[in-house]
Amino acid sequence: MGIHKATALLDDLIEKAGGCAIVDGGFATQLEKHGASINDPLWSALCLIKDPDLVKRVHLEYLEAGADILVTSSYQATIPGFIPRGFSIEEAESLLEKSVKLAVEAREKFWNAVKRNSRHSYNRALVAASIGSYGAYLADGSEYSGNYGPHVSLDKLKDFHRRRLQVLVDAGPDLLAFETIPNKLEAQACVELLEEENIQIPSWICFSSVDGENAPSGESFKDCLDVINKSDKVSAVGINCAPPHFIQTLIQKFKELTGKAIIVYPNSGEIWDGISKEWLPSKCFDDEKFELFAPIWRDAGAKLIGGCCRTTPSTIQAVSKALKERSGLDTF
């Protein structure tokens, strides 16, 4: 399948969803709601080792809530992250593959169940393999600063991501999701890797933002998107794990800077302290606020909307309800 035909899968999903597809929500948040202890450098990827059945359960909960796209549990799953835990390279790669397999199995189980009902309002979901930033692997909060230091070069970032990218693609996802990219250098590394590896499935690249204006590194989004716009292997660009208060303005900014589909999946507005490893109190969006703002974000130009940290299936259900009501689709 060529890249253009593969990209049509995403375009078709957006069309079937009424012009805006729904991405799932906070994965680690929901794992913790079920009692998982993931205060660990591997974060949600720890459950790939300890409780894969729970990983699949959370995927199913998001599908039931109306998600059109499942993002795998591989955000903080890396080969150099697994090896210090005593895993061989082959075992580490198998865990990466498992993250895709669990999401695909959940998707197929759910779809086989609902498609028997001709009145259902679900779409057959796509699976996006999550590729967290280098800062996510470091687990030091640097995905929210972009401060990787002078020794982290373009080649080092490509070397870091390359094998994980290859393993995840071979596992058979529909999409790739590069998440919380904090600077232009890593965006460039992602784009060049897609070209060098001749990846034939569509990707999205999402940045975070701590000021609502720029990438976490302080670089302008124009500079970051100029790099991405040159690649036909990146189908969507946007923002994840930034406060929802920033989203409308950032959608408008991205609309001026790119012709690619815009994706947004903000966190609840709480602030993560990467040093103390805890969420700090702040102004938050609850499910009702997400329900209120999702149509506003869509009308501003977003083609994919979901949630990130501290959002749950109930958040995604609220978003789905709001978007389907506004698009004239049936609600479930």
Image: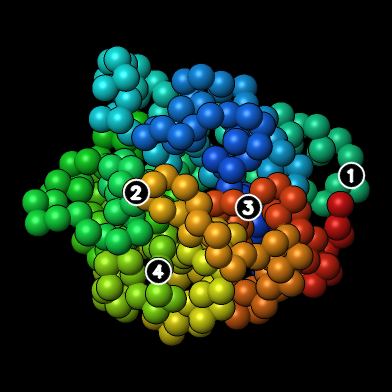
Mark 1 and mark 3 lie on one chain; the one further toward the N terminus is: 1
Amino acid type at image mark 3: Thr
Q: Nearer the viewer, mark 1 or mark 2?
A: 2
- Is 184 left or right of 91, judged from the image as shown? left
Mark 4 and mark 3 lie on one chain; the one further toward the N terminus is: 4
Numbered circle sitting on residue 97: none
Per the model, the C-alpha gap separating discs 3 and 2 is 22 Å
Residue topped by disc 3: 311
- Is 247 left or right of 119, judged from the image as shown? left
Question: Residue at 63% of width from left, 40% of height from top?
Answer: 30
Q: Position of residue 284 (x, y in %)?
A: 62, 65
Residue topped by disc 4: 210
Residue topped by disc 2: 275
Question: Residue at 29% of width from left, 15% of height from top?
Answer: 86
Mark 1 and mark 4 lie on one chain; the one further toward the N terminus is: 1
Find residue 71 and report its image quarter.
top right
Give the crowd class for mark 1: few <14, some 14-19, many >=20 residues within 10 Å. Answer: few
Q: Quadrant of the N terminus?
A: top left
- Element marked by disc 1: loop
CB-based contact (under 8 Å), mark 2 and mark 4 = no
Q: Which of 64 and 193 is in front in this view?
A: 64
- Element marked by disc 4: loop
Per the model, the C-alpha gap separating discs 4 and 3 is 18 Å
Numbered circle sitting on residue 118: 1
Q: Position of residue 142 (x, y in %)?
A: 29, 54
Amino acid type at image mark 4: Val
Q: Position of residue 215 (x, y in %)?
A: 34, 69
